[in-house]
Amino acid sequence: MISISNLSKQYTHNGQTIGALNDVTLTVGAGEIFGVVGPSGAGKSTLIRCVNLLEQPTYGSVKVAGQEMTSLTSLELRQARKKIGMIFQHFNLLTSRTVAGNIAFPLEVAGMAKVERNDRVKDLLKLVGLADKAEAYPAQLSGGQKQRVGIARALATQPQVLLSDEATSALDPQNTTAILTLLKDLNRQLGLTILLITHEMEVIKQVCDHVAVLQAGRIIEQGRVYDLIAKPGSHISQALFPVVDVPPLSSGARCVSITFFGQAADQPVLAGLVRNFDITINILAGSIQTITGQRVGRLQVEMTGAQVEQALAYLTELGLYVEVQ
Ligand code: ADP
């Protein structure tokens, strides 16, 4: 749905050239929730604004639904942007318009007839859980409610893609979870593709299927969130399941990191290991978390004994991810 190739962006400011993005390549499949995470100044806003050409890339290609965005005329670009909704950290609502008026705005611009527009606004209000707030003004809403209005407005023209620019960064943790849950529901119900940028790992953990880590304008890691978690050395794995510094191992022992997904996270795997193999296991660290709706566990253990290799092979056969450190 979104295909970005070799994208670079340079700004010129006071005669100085600032390289905001450097050779960024990523692909977002239809129906995915793809997160770009990185610290402030990494280039996240620039990247997302290049997708709908709010920023003109210096170099590279940006395709949305197969259409090359960088070579469109301004009229074609206006048409193409109808397929791309966007939500913002500070909501960007029109304060002098009611909730319904804000949501109706892009439909008015698109020239939709009033009766049809009113029906559509009603449906959108229901979709985001604000049916009773149609006549309220933004100043009367909580941050979470304002973002719901932003989402309804972004979806008014029935886009295939939603761009989310730090949409939960101004919200408290409860509202963050509520908005992320709404985005996930919309992704499922409407098949909406979502590209979001965030500096919060929590956002990646709650909703993203895929992730790219951006640092100083470059992607330093990308992939399926679960695949990256299974690699204890990856940035994502380190952020969500930090590898704990372990005390010096007993002589001949192996330090093993075991990652479990889904049902396997609830199985008595270690008991099975000790029963079936001539080994001793000492647990060094462990945790279980819910990541993108699935339980994921990570154990760091010390293994000794004659059958460590067989035990490791057995764990892999069970479908667990095993890394010897
Ligand atoms: P992030 O969203 O990750 O915080 P940005 O994309 O906003 O990062 O910024 C990336 C880099 O580009 C920063 O060094 C920032 O100062 C610079 N930058 C962003 N927008 C402009 C601009 N309009 N003019 C000059 N420099 C800019």
Image (cartoon, rainbow, N blue to C red):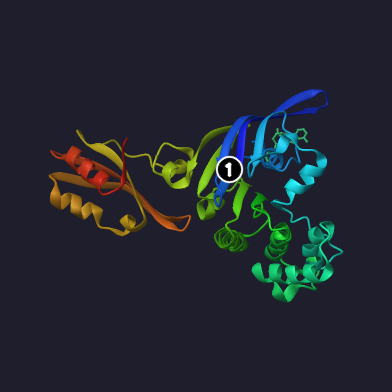
Position of the C terminus, as image quadrant, is top left
Amino acid type of disc 1? Val
Compared with 6, 167 (above or below) is: below
Looking at this rendering, what residue extends furthest in the bottom direction? 132
Identify the residue position indicated by label 1 in the image: 37
Q: Quadrant of residue 140?
A: bottom right
Counting from the top left corner in percent of width and height, residue 111 is at 84, 59
Q: Secondary structure at mark 1?
A: strand
Q: Quadrant of residue 257?
A: top left
Q: Residue at x 17, y 50 (%)?
A: 274
Q: How many marks?
A: 1
> Which quarter of the frame holds ligand 1?
top right
Q: Nearer the viewer, residue 37 or 250?
A: 37
Report the side of 95 relative to 207 (left or right): right
Q: Residue at x 60, y 39 (%)?
A: 3
Compared with 178, 195 (above or below) is: above
